[in-house]
Amino acid sequence: MILVSGCLLGICCRYDGSSRPNPDVMALVYRRNILPVCPEQLGGLPTPRKAAYIARGDGFDVLSGTARVLTVKAQKDVTDAFMRGARECERLARLFGIKKAILKSRSPSCGLTVQTGVTAAVLILAGIEVLEAG
């Protein structure tokens, strides 16, 4: 089973209420068991919601308490919701014995290569292989 960012499967859960279906990821549905998640929704944030970014670091820094997740315009601190959602994803991964995750690139929750998101960091530290897709 693979944990997958729901927006990559066409679920309208992105901050702006849209999705980012990825044909390669969607094709996995026919070959593998998939568990779709949206960490931000699992953390209690609504859809749509204000865009957010990680200030002063990355997801690992958020976990260590040296960085925060803020909304882009109002600078409202939404770190606690991002942390809750990341922990819920980790809990689901453990519950289902998941060893691999495919997460949405360029996301403060799920990103990996440009800036590691909060959920990506939590899953990496839990020993889960994390890949990203656009």
Image: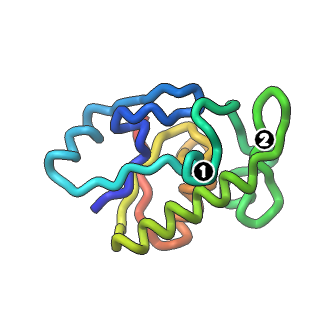
Q: Which mark is residue 70?
A: 2
Report the amino acid beneath label 2.
Leu
Image location (x, y in percent) of residue 87:
58, 65
Q: Quadrant of the C terminus?
A: top left
In this rendering, would 19 be left or right of 76? Answer: left
Label 2 element class: strand
Occupied quadrant, residue 9: top left
The disc label shown at residue 98, or none:
none
Residue 110 placement (x, y as % from top left):
54, 47
**CB contact under 8 Å: marks 1 and 2:** no
Categorize mark 1 by other alpha carbons within 10 Å: few (<14), some (14-19), many (20+).
many
Task: Say which residue appears at 58% left-offset and 34% top-offset.
Answer: 47
- The disc labelled 1 sits on which kind of residue? Thr
Instruction: Say which residue appears at 80% left-offset and 63% top-offset.
Output: 65
In the picture, the quarter occupied by the N terminus is: bottom left
Which residue occupies the foreground of this view, 132 or 43? Answer: 43
On screen, 32 above or below 104?
below
Q: Relative to 60, is 110 above or below?
A: above
Q: Quadrant of residue 130?
A: bottom left
Does the rendering let one see residue 14?
yes
Q: Does 29 sit left or right of 38 as displayed? A: left
Residue under numbered circle 1: 116
Image quadrant in which you'd find residue 19: top left
Q: Give the number of marks.
A: 2
